[in-house]
Image (tube, rainbow, N blue to C red):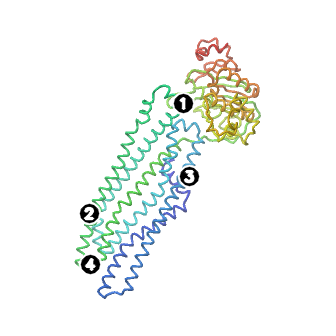
Amino acid sequence: MSPDRLLRRMTGTIPVWVAMLALASTASACATTLLPAAIGKAIDVLLRTMSGHASVLSLWDWVGCCTLLTVLSAAGEAFTQFGTGTVTGNCSGWLRHELFRHILACGPRLTGRFAPGDAVSRLIGGTAEAGGAPVGTVLTLTSTIPSIGSVVALALIDPWLAVAFLAGMPLVVRVLRSFMRNTSDAYLRYQQTQGTIIAHLVATMTGARTIAAAGTREREIGRVLEPLPRLRAQGERTWQIQGRVQAQSSLIIPLLQVLVVAVGGFELSRGQVSPGGLLAAAQYAALGAGIGAAVGQISRLARGRSGATRAAELLTVPEPRQGTETLPPGRGRVEFRGVSVRIGDSTAIEELDLVIPAGFDVAVVGEAGAGKSTLAALAGRLADPDRGEVLLDGVPLKHLALSELREAVTYAFERPALLGRTVRDMIGFGLPSRPSYADITSAAEAARALQFLRRLPERDLTILSKVPLSGGEHQRLGLARAMARADRSRLLVLDDATSSLDTVTAMQVNQALTELHGDRTKIIVTHRAATAADADLVAWLEAGRLRRLGPHAELWRDPGYRAVFGADKADAA
């Protein structure tokens, strides 16, 4: 989606408020444009009244007109300020909602292309800037009313005044065009650099313990702050552009005024312009140039377009199309047919043909980068293959309704995200109804987290953010969440979900899975030889290809297979 189309959609969400903003700003601009003429007319009437050629009543009529225009201008400006906040807030909120929905719909597909910090920067900062674009557009257009009205007014006072004013206008137009072009580019580059810094910072905070242990703090500070000079350069460039425009306007506007006043003085001497008309002409010369007002609105519009550009880039990642089919009766047979997956310029999975029989436990092993986690993601459609298809009980995953797929497949991850306010909320995350204490206890016991859970101040109702967790405890809570969902599923995918557990605890978790969910199909990504030995079959991946499929005992005869486990060889016994 193009940035302009995104801005049009966003503006269309609150057409009434945009129309009211346009009406208020137009009324204010029109009143501001008419006011110099009314003041000039009042001065002329005052001079005639003092000479006895006009009545005091006529003077008060023009004073009242000036007062009315002043009130209308102020009221329109006040509502414009109120409408600006309302339109900007509503547009930013709508865009954030759309982007957040899109991010969640795309899931790992989007976060694989955009770093989380960069995506958050676009979601928060980009949408805040983009939300100001409709206001910037409206006010940029209405800011032309004083300029156009000034030309018309000067022509009505005396045609030569309009000619003198228009002679200098090409300079004003040139300045504004240059400002719009350069400012848009500067703001876009500034936001891009800011997003890079945020992405680096988020990654660094995530790995804070590793950085501390490695003693690389200073190096990481340098890496995070490395784009800072570019950020500063773009910030300085923005201010330089604005300063240059202000400097140019400080020369152009007085020159226009001098030119118009000089012509007006000459016409006054000829009796073609009245004293009030000359005063109005001087005001119209300054009002018509209008660089100050235009610069502010063009700047807002430029920031809005750059923000919309960054937000629209998130929308270039297509949402996966969801099917409508349901699953037939089955026990979780999984088929990979000619599946290939590319990540960037590298191949993660290549021409994979694999059948996992229903009810079997299949361990997936291989060296780092062999494609194990990619295979696990494909099994529940957390990722889609570039070629080929994945089927569950004979139905291609892309044909399944999302609710059907998510109920049929349960995941546990190496680094699970613990979502929810309390421990109970986290374990029951994604279930249609809140689980009971008995359900939580059962799931925690199966994940060997019950003893830890009972030590918490309020047990399962303890606020999750207040619970200090070790790596193993973190992982066991993720396993408990999977256990709570397992009864409703026909396929369990454990993506290295016991890597932080000691060997005994990992074996106990595997035993609980067998006892409670032995009839479920399981895909178990693992680095442990003992876990592979407990599985019915082992899928040995190498460089994205299935090297062999068979029982662990049979594969163990191959030195290459034994080398996959390294120090875990002793666990095979």
Q: Residue at (35%, 70%) from the top-left corner?
A: 152
Q: Within 10 Å of the Cα at label 3, are there few (<14), some (14-19), or many (20+) other Cα atoms?
A: some
**In the image, what residue type sits under mark 3?**
Trp
Mark 2 to mark 3 CA distance (whole Å) = 45 Å
Q: Residue at (66%, 32%) from the top-left corner?
A: 477
Numbered badge on residue 278: none
**In the image, what residue type sits under mark 1?**
Arg
Q: Is residue 253 visible?
A: yes
Q: Mark 1 or mark 3, which has the lower sequence index?
A: 3
Q: Mark 2 or mark 1, which has the lower sequence index?
A: 2
Above or below, comparing residue 208 to residue 153 in the picture: above
Numbered badge on residue 272: 4
Q: Secondary structure at mark 3?
A: helix
**Residue under pointer 2:** 255
Mark 4 to mark 2 CA distance (whole Å) = 22 Å
Q: Secondary structure at mark 4?
A: loop
Mark 1 to mark 4 CA distance (whole Å) = 79 Å
**Residue under pointer 1:** 342
Task: Give the number of the mark in front: 4 or 2.
Answer: 2
Above or below, comparing residue 269 to residue 25 in the picture: below
Task: Give the number of the mark in front: 1 or 4.
Answer: 4
Q: Secondary structure at mark 2?
A: helix
Above or below, comparing residue 322 to residue 40 in the picture: above
**Residue 357 spot, x, y in % from top left:** 72, 25
Q: In the rendered view, does 360 fall on the left or right side of 45?
A: right
**Residue under pointer 3:** 94
**Residue 558 spot, x, y in % from top left:** 62, 12
Q: Mark 1 or mark 4, which has the lower sequence index?
A: 4
Mark 2 to mark 1 CA distance (whole Å) = 63 Å
